[in-house]
Image (spheres, rainbow, N blue to C red):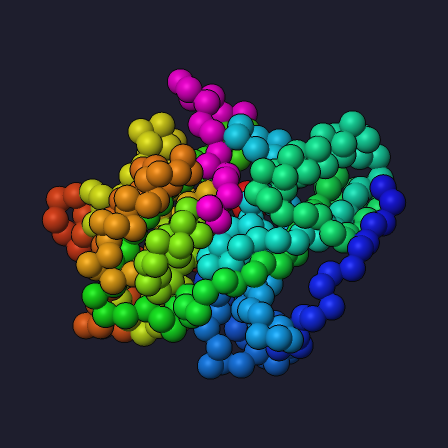
Amino acid sequence: MKEFACPLPADMGDTVQLSHGGGGVMMHRLLERVVFPALGDDPARAHHDGAVVDAVGGTRLAFTTDTYVVRPRFFPGGDIGSLAVHGAVNDLAMCGARPKWLSVGLILEEGLPMDELRRVLESLRRAADEAGVTVVTGDTKVVDRGKGDGLYLNTAAIGVVEHSLDIGPASLRDGDVILLSGDIGRHGIAVMAAREGLAFETTIQSDSAPLHEPVLAMLDAGLPVHCLRDLTRGGLAAALKELMRDSGLTARIREADIPVEPQVRGACEMLGLDPLQVANEGRMIVFLPAEMAEKALAVLRRFPETQNAVKIGTVSAEQKGRVVLESVIGTRRVVEMPPGEQLPRIC
């Protein structure tokens, strides 16, 4: 594939902020003890799904990047091409940004069938068109046979922040309500089933989908959104634990209110997995003042990706950095960060 490029807007500023996605304890230790210190990360900055930077002329831009190594590359409900677009778009959406531009980096292993590469690129282009983002630059590298597992894919994306809100962990407040945009666990189980050849009564489809339209609709409705987070590696548990650690607050959630499809719950029980820790690629949590919960739910339920949005809990200042789950039988337990990725290579 030929390298391609075209210029981005010339008025971008030079403010820099690091960001990171979800994962387990080991990933966080790697980031906090090695990566961030080496790259000059400021501990006072809140880690988020993307970085909001100030461009020349007062424009605020959101910037994110992610690399996709999913195996298998094609799975029910998606593939590595559409996944790479949805992941980038959703990271920008979690900053409250309108996605605009996308870069694509391809690492191809010698021997990858051209028909498979074309299929991935067609899916990527289709997903980008549907999300309203333009692929403006990219790069292609080929590695020796046996050194690249077929295909790795990187996307970086830029979006425009069209509001004055500071959406992120630092904006979380005591009394905030926690909304979940839909059922959890489908992406991780769909990939796992495809990888291991597991058969269920009905095929479990990945939840991979872009979330920017529901987010922008909430902002257009004037809702004072405090924080957003998509539920990727580490699932709901990791996302909540990260945010509570960064904000110094506590999340109190109710198991009975967290939707999990019966097929997914059964698969998790069979595989010894916790649905709260299984990855998603089209789900998010929303934090905003409790009195705005019903209005926010009404907006979210207008969109197919978030039509089953529900309230699952609240934020409290009583304790610091904890996630407390109330079980269906009324007992309480502290939810911890996953020790590692339960299902590796799912994104």
Vertical comparison of 13 with 279: above or below = below
Q: Position of residue 153 (x, y in %)?
A: 69, 47
Q: Main secondary structure of the magenta part?
A: loop
Highlighted magenta segment, given as a residue range: 195-213
For the point 36% across and 27% down, the residue is: 263
Residue 140 pos. (x, y %): 81, 49
Give left or right: position of 324 versus 92: left
Q: Nearer the viewer, residue 120 or 134?
A: 134
Residue 306 visible in the snapshot: yes
* Residue 142 among those drawn in magenta: no
For the point 32% across and 40% down, the residue is: 301
Q: Toward the viewer: 96 or 261?
A: 96
Q: Is residue 197 magenta?
A: yes
Q: Is residue 344 left or right of residue 118?
A: left
| Residue 334 seen from this side | no
Closer to the camera in the image, 290 or 330 = 290
Location of the C terminus (image quadrant):
top right
Q: Nearer the viewer, residue 113 or 340?
A: 113
